Amino acid sequence: MTQTQSEILFTRAQESIPGGVNSPVRAFRGVGGVPRFIARGQGSSIYDVDGNEYIDYICSWGPLILGHRPPDVIEALTAVLDVGTSFGAPTGREVELAELIVDAVPSVEMVRLVNSGTEATMSALRVARGFTGRTLTVKFEGCYHGHVDSLLVKAGSGVATLGIPDTAGVPKEFADTTIALPYNDLDRVEQVFSERGDKIAAVITEPVSGNMGCVPPQPGFLEGLRRITERHGSLLIFDEVMTGFRLSYGGAQQLYGITPDLTTMGKIIGGGLPLAAYGGRADIMKKVAPVGPIYQAGTLSGNPLAVTAGIAMLHYLEQHPEVYDALEERAAQLTSYVPEGVCVNRVGSMFTFFFQPGPVTDFESAKRSDTARFGRFFHFLLDHGVYFPPSQFEAGFLSAAHTDRDIAKTMSTIREFFESQ
Ligand code: KE4
């Protein structure tokens, strides 16, 4: 049997790149088989190097809320190439993007641009420790905040997909500064704070988790975190790298009406280019160098290319609020068929089909899913031109480019899988 171009490239890639990929979840280890090497994307579709077309429900893991190559972003990027790519000096564009974020996100009075969600969460944690003078962090099992040393404790996303208990290379001393609790378990948070509250710098959480699959906050959970952290003088950090500008223009914090002290953002604000940010209360952010003593820096932070793409993306979302209604409608349609023995969690345009009866409210329950059957489901869809995330412990994403026809085809393919079982 002749090899596909993806197979040939995957074999070659593994010679020079660990696992042949630049991010573990892309290697299909959670579902088996050979990852598809992608040649191009357009609208709601991606095309692999063998010419196969797929309806894309990964959307670059969230950034592409407008789909692939949205005209406004592409035009803006084409134009900025005429002025340069990076200066290592301040530009007016960065001020414009910062002001857009401040205007959009309720908790953000000041913001610092960085290059990845990991950098954003790492920096936000350092700021929280520096501001409070405390060392400990509370996170939740199954939440993923990037590959920050101290946060790779019972993490979700690729760590969960690969079943890595707690990643090698993180000194015990770092991991010991993190208290990992079950998501949605407010009693455990109360208990930990009653014992060690005066040592806890911050609670960091995904307000809606997308990294153990999509798991919404139970009623009262986020409100409880806000109340408990306030009572103990700890900071509340919402990691909105995934939910920011996706669940609403003001993110999950606007949707749920909870204002954290710090917020991390990424994905959508870069318009598909490497850009992330952390921000929040001005009194906290003014502790960041060069104004304050907490150091954080970055060669390409705020670079004109990524910032231009981000401005074009946020301008479009600001000027077309109907995008969110359309996403809600289409995602509700897509997840309206819930097969027997499957539990579907969805918030806005983030969703996961868990292969178990459910409910799925935390990492322990998510892990009870039949990942082998999910793998068969994934490949059935892939063979029929529908590209879901290659892991039970990831969220799928819809974009404004997904059409009713895409949804209809996806739903009929899902039905076909279950009817063929
Ligand atoms: P990056 O460093 O990958 O830009 O962002 C890390 C991050 C932080 N916080 C949240 C809530 C996130 O979801 C992420 C990254 N998300 C994963 C998808 N589950 C990225 C995909 C990947 O690792 O390849």
Image: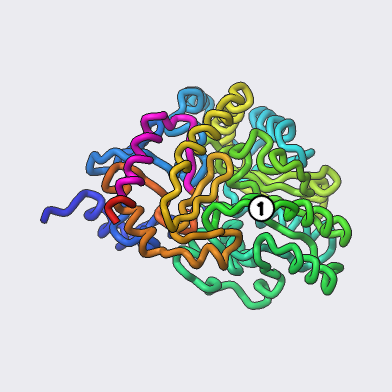
Q: Position of residue 121 (x, y in %)?
A: 66, 54
Q: Position of residue 177 (x, y in %)?
A: 71, 71
Image quarter hosting the N terminus: bottom left
Q: Is residue 187 left or right of residue 334?
A: right
Element type where label 1 sits in the image = loop
- Does residue 68 show up magenta in the picture? no
Q: Residue furthest front?
A: 340
Residue 362 lies in what quarter of the image? Answer: bottom right
Q: In the image, is residue 110 above or below residue 309?
A: below
| Residue 231 seen in the current view | yes
Circle count: 1
Q: In the image, is residue 178 above or below residue 327?
A: below
Q: Is residue 383 left or right of residue 77?
A: left
Q: Position of residue 9 (x, y in %)?
A: 26, 53
Badge 1 local density, few (<14 within 10 Å), some, or many (20+)? many
Q: Position of residue 70 (x, y in %)?
A: 46, 27
What is the three-letter code of the residue carrying label 1?
A: Pro
Q: Residue furthest left?
A: 1
Q: Identify which residue is drawn at 81% across, 54% down.
A: 293
| Residue 37 seen in the current view | no
Task: Please give the range of residues in magenta.
Answer: 396-417
Q: Specify the principal SS of the magenta part.
A: helix
Judging by the rendered image, the residue that carries numbered circle 1 is 217
Colour setting: rainbow
Q: Identify which residue is drawn at 40% across, 35% down.
A: 407
Q: Identify which residue is drawn at 51% across, 43% down.
A: 62
Image quarter hosting the C terminus: bottom left
Q: Is residue 268 left or right of residue 335?
A: right
- Does residue 397 show up magenta in the picture? yes
Q: Identify which residue is drawn at 71% across, 38% down.
A: 254
